[in-house]
Image: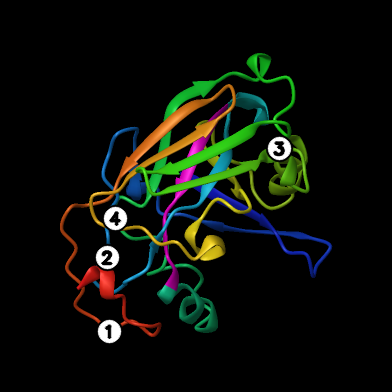
């Protein structure tokens, strides 16, 4: 199973949600663009994979794709991120699982995101407010993850469209590079069919 872990700044405790483990895709795969959204986005994240004995077995790049114009209604309905995040082929991981001995400090990794030749975003795992070991400690207060559980640390700031207001387009090639973890390549479909009007402004570049 795969997990998403975020820190709510308005609370002392941590909060998280469980993703759709059937939506996992790998390096070089194409993300699904749901027909009910006009605003597909990426969420580059550092993730760790649990091992036996509740240890951190390794680190991997995680892309938690999200459709932004549907996200807020999801949370208002108290259902959590269902239509906005759990759609088919929305959870990218790869290209490598890197063991902890290869990562001196998981909170000191540079992040570089390129969307074709159009967009270039940079960030760092130093923006995280908690070490992966602390995240694991908090998770264990709620449940015991099985070996192989993927836990995402949250989106790297300034590395997604919702913050930059520069949105994905059909045919885009996404390169998400983390220092020491390699580059996760994700593709956007070359044909997008939107069947439901967006609650946001209509995108002329999708017509």
Mark 3 or 2 closer to N-term?
2
Q: Residues within 10 Å of mark 4 (few under 14, many from 20)?
A: some
Observer-nearest residue: 100 or 54?
A: 100
Mark 4 or 2 closer to N-term?
2
Left/right placement of residue 179 relative to residue 205 reads right
Q: Residues within 10 Å of mark 1 (few under 14, many from 20)?
A: few
| Looking at the image, residue 193 lies above or below residue 200 | above
The residue shown at (27%, 60%) is 33
| Looking at the image, residue 17 lies above or below residue 175 | below
Q: Residues within 10 Å of mark 2 (few under 14, many from 20)?
A: many
For disc 3, the marked residue is: 132
Mark 1 or 4 closer to N-term?
4
The residue shown at (31%, 71%) is 38
| Looking at the image, residue 20 lies above or below residue 35 | above
Residue 142: x %, y % from top left? 69, 53
Q: Which mark is residue 197?
A: 1
Mark 1 or 2 closer to N-term?
2
The residue shown at (27%, 55%) is 32
Residue 20 figure quarter: bottom left
Mark 3 or 1 closer to N-term?
3
Residue 39: x %, y % from top left? 37, 68
Q: Which residues are magenta?
A: 59-68
Query: Label 3 vs label 2: CA separation?
Result: 32 Å
Query: Label 1 vs label 4: CA separation?
Result: 20 Å
Query: Label 4 vs label 2: CA separation?
Result: 8 Å
Q: Is residue 65 magenta?
A: yes
1 or 2: mark nearer the eye: 1
For disc 4, the marked residue is: 88
Q: Which mark is residue 34?
A: 2
């Amino acid at each position: 199973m795969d997990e998403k872990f975020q820190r709510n700044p308005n609370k002392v405790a941590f909060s998280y949600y469980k993703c759709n483990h059937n939506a996992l895709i790998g390096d070089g795969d194409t993300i699904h663009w749901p027909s009910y959204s006009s605003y597909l986005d990426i969420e580059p994240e550092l993730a760790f994979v649990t091992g036996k004995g509740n240890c951190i077995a390794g680190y991997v790049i995680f892309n938690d794709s999200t459709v932004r114009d549907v996200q807020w209604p999801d949370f208002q309905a108290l259902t959590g991120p269902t239509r906005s995040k759990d759609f088919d082929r929305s959870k990218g991981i790869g290209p490598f699982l890197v063991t902890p001995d290869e990562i001196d400090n998981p909170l000191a990794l540079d992040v570089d995101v390129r969307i074709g030749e159009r967009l270039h975003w940079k960030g760092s795992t130093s923006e995280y407010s908690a070490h992966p070991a602390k995240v694991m400690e908090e998770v264990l207060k709620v449940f015991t993850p099985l070996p192989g559980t993927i836990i995402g640390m949250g989106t790297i700031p300034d590395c997604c469209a919702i913050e930059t207001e520069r949105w994905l387009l059909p045919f885009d090639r996404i390169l998400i590079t983390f220092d020491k973890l390699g580059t996760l390549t994700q593709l956007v479909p070359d044909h997008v069919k939107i069947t439901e009007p967006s609650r946001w402004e209509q995108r002329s570049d999708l017509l």
